[in-house]
């Protein structure tokens, strides 16, 4: 059928339906499916409120390997002294604020510390195995009712804490974010699984407070300014 | 050793480090088991990341001068605490309390500052 002829027939159908509707003969209107409930709105600048002590509560006993590295650690060897961005999850759990930009397909976490960016893929994307390890890893997320679950893998080996506790590239982090107090507080439970470091996962909990007028400042540093 | 004994009050505190430094390990580089307090004149305010540094000209009871460096959070965190270069200026006299550097240098991690008007300001 030619495009012109098809177009002509389509116009005839529309005209016929319009006529029947005008006569009150077309009354069956297909029901409109109810719109899906939009996910909670996490967008905004969030200020850390709960303690962020690096020792951390509930920290499991390190494995012999991690214990040996911890005891041999020289704080002057911490790459952050040379302005190297600490990897996730260390970099995401500190006292500095972060901003969330939210779309249906992706959440973007913009951290003040070292300008770290995390892209949370919400569209079903999965990181292929061949991806090289990254300091902030690769994150995929989904909603389970009002809880945002984020799983992060492919994290490059590095320090879990500034005190010298290491992870060896096998770390996987599950975050469970939830809003409370009428969207003024954001809480997260972080489960850090790193078999080379702990025999059981390290579970931590943090809170942030919404700063409606806040902004994120650049925090890029120059190693030449370091005092250590 | 003639240092800043007259103006440095070393006090032993068991202060829980609830808001650890984000970059380097605070307890590894600073002695978080005690605090020192110094009083002097601001000579410079480095408003930089990842840590700001306030330079304080301190003179001890023997007229021996020492320049202390007071390490702070980076600019963004200081802005939220209201400590900016237009508020803290060279020439102002302040007192500062913080964790001393473990290596003995006149360097501290700043906890509180007593401003020229006598009001304390919590920095960390």
Image (cartoon, rainbow, N blue to C red):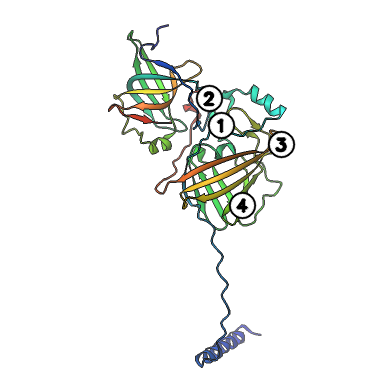
Q: Answer with mark 3 or mark 1, whichever residue precedes in sequence.
A: 1
Q: Which mark is residue A54?
A: 1
Residue wearing tag 4? A141
The mark found on residue A195 in the picture is 3
- Confirm or deny contact between disc 1 and disc 4 (CB under 8 A): no
Density class for disc 4 (Cα within 10 Å; few <14, some 14-19, many ≥20) is: many
Whether discs 1 and 2 lie on one chain: the answer is no
Q: Secondary structure at mark 4?
A: strand
Side of A16 relative to B43 (left or right): right
**Do residues under tags 1 and 2 come within 8 Å of each other at their CB atoms?**
yes
State the residue lying farthest toward the left: B117
Q: Are marks 2 and 3 in contact (CB under 8 Å)?
A: no
Single out the residue that lies furthest toward the top.
Answer: B1
Q: CA distance from mark 1 to mark 2?
A: 9 Å
Check disc 1: other Cα within 10 Å, few if <14, some if 14-19, many if 20+.
many
Number of numbered markers? 4
Give the alpha-carbon distance from disc 2 to disc 3, as whole Å: 26 Å
Which quarter of the figure is the C terminus of chain B placed in? Answer: top left
Q: Which residue is mark 2?
A: B27
Q: In the rendered structure, the residue with mark 1 lies on which chain?
A: A
Whole-percent x and y of residue B83? 36, 33
The earlier-in-sequence mark between 1 and 4 is 1
**A3 sits left or right of A207 in the view:** right
Residue at 39% x, 11% y is B5
Q: Is residue B107 above or below residue A118?
A: above
Describe the element under mark 1 as helix, strand or loop.
loop
x, y percentage for residue A121? 60, 52
Q: Quadrant of the N terminus of chain B?
A: top left
Question: Are labels 4 and 3 assigned to the same chain?
Answer: yes
Q: Are marks 2 and 4 in contact (CB under 8 Å)?
A: no
């Amino acid at each position: 059928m030619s495009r012109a002829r098809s177009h002509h027939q389509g116009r005839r159908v529309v005209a016929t339906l319009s006529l029947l509707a005008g006569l009150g003969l077309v009354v069956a209107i297909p029901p409109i499916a109810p719109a899906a409930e939009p996910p909670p709105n996490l967008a905004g600048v969030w200020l850390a409120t709960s303690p962020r002590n690096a020792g951390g509560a509930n920290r499991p006993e390190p494995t012999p390997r991690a214990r040996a590295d911890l005891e041999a650690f020289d704080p002057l060897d911490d790459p952050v002294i040379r302005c190297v961005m600490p990897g996730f999850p260390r970099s995401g759990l500190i006292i500095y604020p972060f901003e969330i930009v939210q779309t249906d397909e992706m959440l973007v976490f913009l951290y003040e510390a070292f300008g770290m960016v995390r892209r949370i893929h919400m569209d079903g994307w999965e990181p292929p195995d061949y991806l090289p390890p990254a300091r902030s890893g690769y994150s995929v997320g989904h909603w389970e009712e009002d809880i945002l679950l984020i799983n992060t893998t492919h994290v490059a080996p590095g320090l879990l804490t500034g005190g010298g506790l290491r992870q060896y590239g096998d770390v996987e982090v599950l975050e469970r974010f939830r809003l409370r107090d009428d969207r003024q507080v954001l809480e997260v439970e972080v489960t850090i699984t790193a078999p080379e470091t702990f025999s059981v996962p390290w579970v931590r909990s943090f809170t942030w407070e919404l700063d409606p007028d806040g902004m994120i400042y650049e925090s890029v540093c120059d190693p030449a300014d370091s005092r250590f | 050793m003639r240092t800043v004994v007259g103006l440095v009050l070393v006090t032993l505190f068991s202060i829980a480090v609830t808001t650890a430094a984000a970059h380097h390990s605070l307890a590894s580089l600073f002695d978080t088991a005690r605090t020192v307090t110094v009083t002097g004149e601001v000579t410079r305010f480095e408003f930089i990341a990842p840590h700001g540094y306030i330079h304080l000209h301190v003179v001890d009871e023997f007229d021996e001068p020492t320049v202390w460096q007071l390490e702070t959070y980076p600019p963004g965190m200081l802005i939220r605490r209201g400590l900016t270069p237009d508020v803290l200026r060279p020439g102002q006299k302040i007192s500062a309390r913080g964790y001393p550097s473990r290596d003995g240098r006149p360097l501290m991690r700043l906890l509180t500052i007593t401003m020229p008007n006598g009001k304390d300001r919590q920095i960390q």
